[in-house]
Amino acid sequence: MNPTSLKIFYGNGTKNLSSPVNLEQCIPNRDKLLCNIFVDLSQFNNQAIKYSFNLTDIVNGSHSIREIKLKVDTVKPEVTFFNYSVSERRLSINMSVTEQNFESIKYYDKNSSIPSWKTLCSALKSDFCARTITLSSGFHDIEIAAIDEAGNSDSEIISFIAV
């Protein structure tokens, strides 16, 4: 109750930083505050860090949460090769992706009757994904995204007519 300051502490043990949180930007929710914050973690890319928060109230009482470990990944996957071909209703996709923390390659057909993200590859073989999918006849506008475990992505968009 009655917070006056909130700080985030983060670092890798060698380099440790802190940043104040603007409490005026937090949203009251019952007896809690919901705060969205942004800190630039790019200097810790591919490293493990720890972070914690310290909250101080108007009578100078403070409370800290325990440190939480987090692996930092701020770089999107790199699509190093992308090729596709269409034969009637079949779409063949070949792509190479460089990413240490690869999660998947997904596609989204904006012209599908029920558009949703679908998985093309959940693992790479020598950084490579090759798949063929069958689509309905007609115009297709498809986004193909390489996604890492942190949610970073790189995508390609293709448009074509399947007959």
Image (spheres, rainbow, N blue to C red):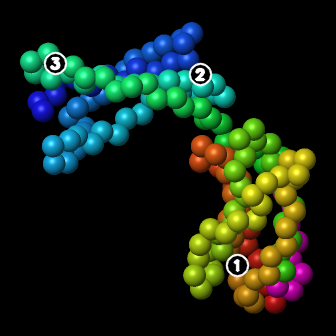
Q: Amino acid at mark 3?
A: Gly
Q: Residue furthest top?
A: 14
Point 48% across, 13% down: residue = 16
- Mark 3 vs mark 1, foreground winner is 3
Q: Are marks 2 and 1 in contact (CB under 8 Å)?
A: no
Residue placed under numbered mark 2 in the picture: 43
Which quadrant is the N terminus positioned in?
Answer: top left
Which quadrant is the C terminus positioned in?
Answer: bottom right
Task: Determine the secondary structure under disc 3.
Answer: loop
> Do we see residue 71 in this rendering?
yes
On the image, which quarter does residue 34 sit in? top left
Q: What segment is highlighted magenta in the picture?
A: 81-89
In front: 123, or 152? 123
Q: Amino acid at mark 1?
A: His
Q: Position of residue 4 (x, y in %)?
A: 16, 24
Residue placed under numbered mark 3 in the picture: 61
Instruction: Name the side, left or right, on which 43 lies relative to 127.
Output: left
